[in-house]
Amino acid sequence: MSDYDVVIIGSGLGGLECAYILSKEGYKVLVLEKNRQLGGSLQTFVREKAIFDTGIHYIGGLDEGQNLYKCFKYFNIYDKLKLIKMDEDGFDRISFGDNGREYKHAQGYDNFVEQLSQEFPHQRQALKNYIEHIQEVCNYFPLYQLKEDNNPVFVTKYLDINARDFIASMVSDPRLQSVLAGSNPIYAGEGDKTPIYVHAHVANTYIESAYKCIDGGGQIERYLSKNIRANGGEIRNYAEVSKIVETEGLVTHVQLNTGEIIHGKNFISNIHPALTMEKLESTKIKNAFRHRMAGLENSSSAFIIDIVLKPDTFKYINYNIYHYNQNDVWTGVNNTPEMGPAGFALFVPKSSFGGEYARSMTLLIYMKFDEVKKWADTYATMPHHDHSRGPEYEEFKIRKAEQVIDMACAKIPNLRNCIQSYTTSSPLSYRDYIGTKDGGLYGISKDYRDPVRTFIAPVTKIPNLYFTGQNLSMHGVLGVTVGAVRTCGLFLGQNYLIRKINDF
Ligand SMILES: Cc1cc2nc3c(=O)[nH]c(=O)nc-3n(C[C@H](O)[C@H](O)[C@H](O)COP(=O)(O)OP(=O)(O)OC[C@H]3O[C@@H](n4cnc5c(N)ncnc54)[C@H](O)[C@@H]3O)c2cc1C
């Protein structure tokens, strides 16, 4: 009756990693993906021969011996990936409209302190304290260091400390505070909300080492999928789960939107917990839990402009830029359309064909779902197949894109002359492609004021239904990978799995 040991709903990074780990350990796994393309935010797309990432611009922790290096080795993908190490003296550069300086986040703890001390010599000791504390915060989460945890008590230290206040307690210079938090669009940082552990893990992983995938992060999906199949696992696209059905205390099967029923012994949901609850037909889950999941706020969404560059016009830069029109880097996420964006993030993909010039670039600003709400009934993916959301939406996107490009020209004056064409995505695109209701980029946003509520466990009240993915521990390649280890640890034993990864 149960055809599969584990049925995984969603082929995002977390779903694929769970499928790899469990199939390698002998479980018969099936991954079900609603879209044609696998990978969720790992997906890439091509315009005029230029490759764009939808959700992986850079990855940390990939130097030999570091946490993601070990995981990617264990997944048997590390040696296949085409990677480029980013600028060691400044992989992220933070700039402000009021001066022409670029403040550099460097790789390596000492180098990080050194580069910023050149701009803030009076804060050298403060920077050393900051960097020590960042490491200390990360050390409180052994799983992130792939360390066995023999005393897995729920750690509350650092869950309930605000990132903005923490940074301000370390360094006194307000500009340096903004510089340290300047890359916060990569975790949708909010001044009144974001806990220090989110800032610390993201900052730390890139300070350890920062890489881009040459020709896009889609290769991570491709190699993981290949390895899952080589382990005997199955992956199906165009397989949207519409119901998860529980009988006598256990989930027995899922139903696809085609009506097809798939039985399994265990089920892992790689989709948002609120959506999982909507699809779950069960009396075992209390309404209070369903309401809690439904009520959790997601991180902000974004408006993204993917630009094809004219050949030989824009020199490739091996770093990202986070540019601000204001000194406060923590409030931009809540800027209204009338206020305009507080700044933008700029990512330049590395192409194997571009030589010294870039083929493309991506500009990202925050955008709330409310701004596109009036087109919420249009869909761009299966099963709806709307080809266009209508001329008004297209006009809205062009107007917005031109506004952002104008803003970017203040930082890169020659930018307009380099643009061959561009395409845009909005919160609606992310809603349709990833399946979150409001297109939130990074899933459930963590809140230091209520840490336990926003910290999702991989287990549910139904013993054979589990969660994985960015809503669990944290978002990002590192956060999702740690989440997959947590989820699969429930099947295999966490310490056993950690030993396997470390010894690989
Ligand atoms: C714009 C952007 C930039 C980012 N940049 C970076 C970066 O530079 N570095 C970094 O480390 N991280 C980055 N991230 C974060 C990172 O990409 C994500 O945290 C991670 O990929 C999420 O993985 P996931 O396992 O949660 O799955 P998701 O990517 O959320 O995928 C879930 C999958 O489930 C599928 N699905 C949904 N509903 C159903 C259903 N009913 N039935 C079947 N399938 C379903 C979806 O189609 C999707 O494929 C970025 C994210 C975004 C959006």
Image (cartoon, grey):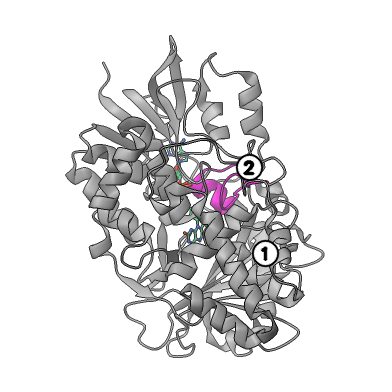
Give the x, y percent position of residue 140: 52, 50
Q: Residue at x 43, y 64 (%)?
A: 59
Q: Looking at the rendered structure, which numbered label has been put on residue 265?
A: none
Residue 253 in sight? yes
Q: In the figure, is residue 493 to the left or right of 415?
A: left
In screen coordinates, is 325 left or right of 130?
A: right
The residue carrying mark 1 is 395
What is the x, y in percent for residue 251? Answer: 41, 19
Measuring 56% from the left and 27% from the top, which residue is drawn there? Answer: 278
Give the residues in magenta: 428-447
84 drawn magenta: no
Amino acid type shown at disc 2: Asp
Q: Report whether the residue tagged 1 is closer than 8 Å to ligand 1.
A: no
Q: Nearer the viewer, residue 341 or 81?
A: 81
Q: Amino acid at mark 1?
A: Glu
Label 2 belongs to which residue? 377
Q: Nearer the viewer, residue 6 or 371?
A: 6
Element type where label 2 sits in the image: loop
Near mark 2 (Cα within 10 A), the count class, few <14, some 14-19 or many ≥20, is: few
